[in-house]
Amino acid sequence: MRLRYGPYAGRSTELLLLRAPDYAKWVLSHRPDGALGRDFSELMAAFDARPLQHACACGAPANQVRAYPNSTELLILCDHCAGQPALGDVTSEVTDYAAALEHVRQTCVRAHRKAQRRIIRRLAAAKGLPPRITEAAAEAFLYGVCLEPTRRQSREAATTR
Ligand SMILES: [Zn+2]
């Protein structure tokens, strides 16, 4: 969906979800039932549905992401390694979009906006998003897995109206 007004007029929600998570979060907490809020909410579900592309350092498939307090460096782990007390007790799970932003809100000491952008960028990269986040890359990333073709076509029709 393309924004028609406001500071991000002309930008797509797909791009903003990945590059301006602080804004997506603001919309979701203030206007969850508006068209924009519903769109961000669906895109966030698509983001979370993307599998991790990396293996854990032990070689097993990774299915958890964790981070230390006040850090946006990601530890990409299998369940077994993530459950080790030395790690499990001191890190928080940031495997999904909302959890990653909550980690920043609760543990990062300053520059929340920057930290939110950094952690989402890193999480997206772990799920296979290329480093240069263009609108086309954002769409391929978000619609590659989750939304069925009919849904995608209806979204495209909605933006060109
Ligand atoms: Zn492991």
Image (tube, rainbow, N blue to C red):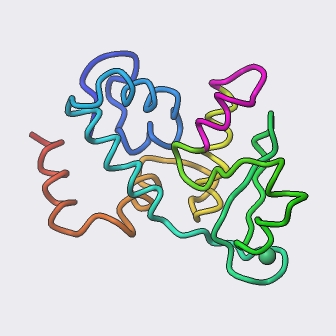
Q: Is residue 102 above or below residue 51?
A: above
Q: Is residue 22 above or below residue 160?
A: above
Q: Is residue 112 magenta?
A: yes
Residue 107 horizontal side relative to residue 123, left or right: right
Expressed as whole percent of the image width and height from the top left, the position of residue 115 reads 69, 32
Residue 146 horizontal side relative to residue 121, left or right: left
Where on the image, by quarter, is ligand 1? bottom right
Expressed as whole percent of the image width and height from the top left, the position of residue 152 reads 22, 60
Residue at image point 49% right, 47% down: 134
Magenta stretch, residue numbers: 100-113
Expressed as whole percent of the image width and height from the top left, the position of residue 136 reads 41, 54
Expressed as whole percent of the image width and height from the top left, the position of residue 137 reads 47, 56
Q: Is residue 103 magenta?
A: yes
- From this viewpoint, which residue is outermost toward the bottom? 59
Residue 146 horizontal side relative to residue 4, left or right: right
So how many labels did they put on this image? 0
- From this viewpoint, which residue is outermost toward the top? 6
Residue nearer the viewer, 29 or 22: 29
